[in-house]
Image (cartoon, rainbow, N blue to C red):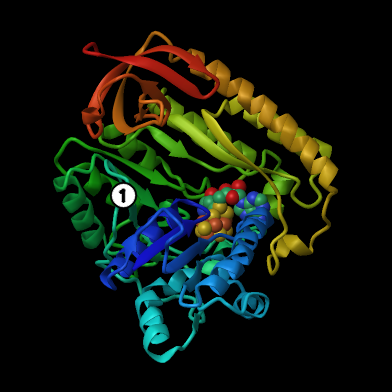
Amino acid sequence: MHYKINTYGCQMNVHESERLAKSLEKLGFTSTEDNNFDIIVFNTCCIRDTAEQKILGHIGKLKKIKRANPKLIIAIVGCMSGQKGKAEELLKKYPYIDIILGANNLESLENAIINLQQKHQKTICVPTDEKPEVIENIEYTRTSMPNAWVNIMYGCNNFCTYCIVPYVRGRERSRKPQSIIAECKSLIENGYKEITLLGQNVNSYGNDFADKSIDFAGLLERLAQIEGDHRIRFMTSHPKDLNEKVIDIIAKYDTLCKNIHLPIQSGSNNILKAMNRHYTREKYLEIVSKIREKMPHCGITTDIMVGFPNESEQDFEDTMDIVNTVRFSGAFTYIYSPRKGTPASEMEQIPYEIKSNRIQRLIKLQNQITKDLSKNYEGNVYRVLVEDIKDNGQLCGRTDCGRLVTFSGDKSLIGSFKNVFITRSQSASLFGTITEDK
Ligand code: SAH
Ligand code: SF4
Ligand code: F3S
């Protein structure tokens, strides 16, 4: 019996698919990349309409496959499934779906399959409880050695007016610090070299503990002190909550990567207010200065959205201006997509042509900045974790500040840290050779 998991969306989903894989393996399924699967799981995303449409297209294609093999099990799980009314809509349109689970109901997968096999019963389980219990000791089938993901918290309390995440993932719940530390220690002992801590807003870690015994800075410090040759990253930071204490801890420990993903969304104070982001462009610039003052080479990356309701040309110019001022080492840029049930979807929308024109201008600007910044790496040596081998036989890995580097070497080097001399750059890519020099 074989399983296949199609993962859409963010790192959180990538990691949760490792959990789904474990559940399936416990039931005796083995993974396949071919089309000989007995169960297919879609771990879905609904952050933008484009994500959703793509997934719906893929579900549509399963109709033929199910007709040819009626025993095939089809499970649609994750964020998209958990939207209000979505399960009913999916079943009506695609009656051949067997299992639908929300992002907070993934633990039900095993029982859902057993019910289907033994009693021919479909399972539909989407969030009803906004604050489900945090489950500790979840098992994963990890496939990303030497990198490992570790969830430190679930859900989100921020309700940015454009965003669907709080509706499909529920309120913020932090994992116990002892469990997180134990998990990280065990990963490091088992040879993992890089751990990425995950949460929608890692800076509010611990806010939900009644005794306020630990915050994100406290957790980071305890993780930084774990012995071993490894490093730690985290995402995502919300600018309203990233404080000086966290910046100081990152600066203090070599094990903490000098790399902060700090989504700005917009450079216009009007728009930031309408987005319910709780910071201004001035506050954002202040955080960037503090980071750079303590860690001049810290990589700062961001997410930017264009075309939010009522975004004027001046608002957009404010975004272009802040991008020019900060000079991000990388930016994910998005066109605003109205999400049903969110406040922004009820606001006055702006025409697609304007959004499309703005995103093109923004991408052009950021590409130029990325290209210019890449030049600064040439001629210098960086410590790189060798992470993978590409199809062309070249090794690749990232610097501490998060830049991807490609270089020659044997694949036995995967999982080790090497000093790499950067010989040339091409837009966001850096190329180099392994060197003994520091
Ligand atoms: N919790 C993280 C990331 C959430 S989703 C954070 O707060 O930063 C990742 C990115 O998708 C967001 O930063 C935002 O830029 C983008 N995004 C979220 N909702 C969107 C929407 N409705 N339309 C377009 N982009 C969106
Ligand atoms: Fe969405 Fe905002 Fe929460 Fe991020 S912080 S997940 S953008 S509501
Ligand atoms: Fe991630 Fe998409 Fe859900 S971005 S949190 S998988 S809606």
Residue 424 position in % (x across, y down): 45, 12
Above or below — where is 193 with respect to 65? Answer: above
Q: Which image quadrant for residue 370?
A: top right
Quadrant of the rendering where the C terminus is positioned:
top left
Quadrant of the rendering where the N terminus is positioned:
bottom left
Q: Which image quadrant for residue 344?
A: bottom right
Residue 132 position in % (x across, y down): 41, 76
- Could one spot residue 31 in this view of the protein? yes
The residue drawn where x is 50% and y is 36% is 287
Q: Secondary structure at mark 1?
A: loop
Residue that mark 1 sits on: 143
- Could one spot residue 174 in this view of the protein? no
Horizontal placement of 17 versus 411: left or right? right
> Which of these two is toward me, 287 or 144?
144
| Residue type at tag 1 | Thr
Number of marks in picture = 1
Horizontal placement of 435 versus 117: left or right? left
> Which of these two is toward me, 89 or 381?
89
Q: For mark 1, does the 10 Å Cα neighbourhood hold few (<14), some (14 to 19), or many (20 or more) residues? A: few
Residue 121 position in % (x across, y down): 46, 88
Q: Name, please, the residue furthest toward the top.
A: 379
Q: Name, please, the residue furthest toward the front.
A: 68
The residue drawn where x is 43% and y is 47% is 235
The residue drawn where x is 56% and y is 62% is 165
Q: Which image quadrant for residue 13?
A: bottom left
